[in-house]
């Protein structure tokens, strides 16, 4: 039996970070089984530049340097180390695998300076050129990466099948309350705010309409009345509780390059795994997974979101069919045990 290759994982965040959880942590037990020795280093510090971030980065680089010296494979998640450092890890014959699920080549939606974007793009391009294998979270990211590296694999964010189980959905009638949900990081609440007028209009037509928001902070969605909003503070457990309380989910998105390059859109995948009909704007590769009108409902304007939601409110059977088809997509393509063989092959190179 051939010896197991050794692996160093350098993660961008801790388990609480969605990106690290769905791209690495869901596979951690399997990776520990198939690679030996197995080492794990994580950054987990704040974004941007600050004394605290600098200290975290130095500590992360030091631990990664120690681990890389004896690793057959180094798997780097999203972090951008100096090219000279990555090249030093690579020079003894170590295999470098780079995992990417954000459009790091584009200007971030927080309005960062163009010089910041350009500097990050240069570091990204250098890393992509040096890597033996690149793993990306969506087709939009693949299109960018393949212009810099011929070895690119698309592996979507993974979900743990055991966490969702059968996720039975209660049967709703058209006369009962209609609960629409949104789950996401509080820095992305501006996406949801783009639907505030449409949701307020829907609430006027549907007396028992509620919006369930699971996030880091409560939203202000004027003119939607606050008493129509059910806020659930985010945690892994609360996320499941929120999904179980919804009849449909929404996922609006902007049209800028940063938003469109998002890798897989975990909140959409979670909603599909919960057998919810999701009304969403295209982007982040979900359009390559779901079929419009069958396993998801795509909208390109607030009016489109409103029309889809109104149909779902008045035709629960239709929503049930879309949700069932959405769940089937997840079972076929997204569970971690389904995607792991491709991840392992990409990491090991065989």
Image (cartoon, helix red, strand yellow):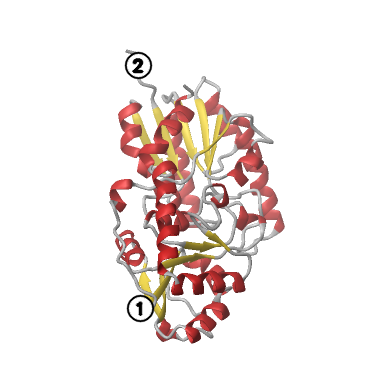
Between discs 2 and 1, the one toward the N terminus: 2
**Residue at the location (61% across, 36% down)?**
128
Would residue 93 appear left or right of 1 to someone viewing this image? right
Look at mark 1 in the image and give the residue it sits on: 176
Is residue 50 something that shows in the picture? yes
Q: Is residue 292 above or below residue 122?
A: below
Q: Nearer the viewer, residue 161 or 293?
A: 293
Assign a secondary structure to mark 1. loop
- Graded by Cα atoms within 10 Å as few (under 14), some (14 to 19) or many (20 or more), the crowding at tag 1 reads few
Q: Quadrant of residue 63?
A: top left
Would residue 140 appear left or right of 115 to someone viewing this image? left
Q: Is residue 35 above or below residue 49?
A: above
Q: Nearer the viewer, residue 322 or 256?
A: 322
Distance in Å between CA atoms under marks 2 and 1: 60 Å
Q: Which mark is residue 34?
A: none
Q: Nearer the viewer, residue 93 or 219?
A: 219
Instruction: Give coordinates of residue 318: x percent, y percent.
Output: 44, 64
**Residue at the location (49% across, 66% down)?**
250
Instruction: Give coordinates of residue 117: x percent, y percent.
Output: 67, 53
Assign a secondary structure to mark 2. loop
**Residue at the location (41% across, 24% down)?**
70
**Residue at the location (30% across, 29% down)?**
33
Q: Which mark is residue 3?
A: 2
Q: Quadrant of residue 343?
A: top left
Q: Which of label 2 and label 1 is nearer to you?
A: 1
- Graded by Cα atoms within 10 Å as few (under 14), some (14 to 19) or many (20 or more), the crowding at tag 2 reads few
Q: Is residue 178 above or below residue 13?
A: below
Instruction: Give coordinates of residue 287: x percent, y percent.
Output: 57, 51
Q: Is residue 65 above or below residue 263?
A: above
């Amino acid at each position: 039996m051939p010896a197991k290759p050794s692996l160093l994982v350098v993660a961008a965040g801790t388990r609480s970070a969605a990106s690290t959880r769905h791209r690495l942590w869901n596979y951690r037990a399997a990776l520990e089984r198939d690679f030996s020795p197995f080492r794990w280093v994580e950054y987990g510090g704040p974004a941007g530049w600050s004394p605290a971030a600098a200290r975290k980065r130095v500590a992360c680089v030091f631990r990664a340097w120690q681990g890389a010296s004896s690793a057959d494979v180094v798997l780097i998640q999203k972090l951008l180390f100096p090219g000279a450092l990555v090249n030093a890890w690579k020079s003894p014959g170590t295999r470098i695998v780079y995992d990417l699920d954000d459009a790091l080549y584009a200007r971030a939606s927080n309005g960062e300076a163009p010089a910041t974007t350009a500097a990050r793009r240069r570091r990204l391009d250098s890393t992509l050129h040096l890597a033996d294998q690149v793993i990306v979270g969506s087709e939009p990211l693949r299109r960018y990466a393949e212009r810099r590296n011929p070895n690119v694999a698309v592996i979507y964010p993974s979900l743990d099948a055991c966490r969702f189980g059968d996720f039975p959905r209660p049967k709703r009638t058209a006369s009962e309350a209609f609960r629409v949900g949104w789950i996401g990081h509080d820095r992305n609440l501006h996406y949801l705010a783009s639907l505030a007028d449409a949701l307020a209009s829907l609430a006027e037509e549907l007396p028992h309409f509620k919006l369930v928001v699971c996030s880091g902070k409560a939203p202000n969605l004027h003119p939607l009345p606050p008493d129509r909003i059910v806020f659930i503070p985010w945690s892994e457990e609360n996320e499941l509780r929120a999904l179980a309380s919804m009849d449909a989910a929404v996922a609006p998105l902007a049209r800028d390059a940063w938003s469109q390059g998002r890798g897989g859109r975990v909140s959409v995948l979670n909603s599909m795994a919960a057998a919810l009909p999701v009304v969403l704007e295209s982007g982040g590769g979900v359009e390559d997974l779901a079929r419009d009108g069958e396993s998801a409902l795509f909208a390109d304007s607030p009016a489109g979101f409103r029309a889809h939601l109104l149909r779902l409110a008045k035709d629960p059977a239709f929503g049930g069919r879309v949700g069932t088809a959405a769940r089937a997509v997840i079972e076929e393509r997204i569970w971690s045990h389904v995607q792991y063989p491709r991840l392992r092959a990409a990491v090991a190179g065989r």
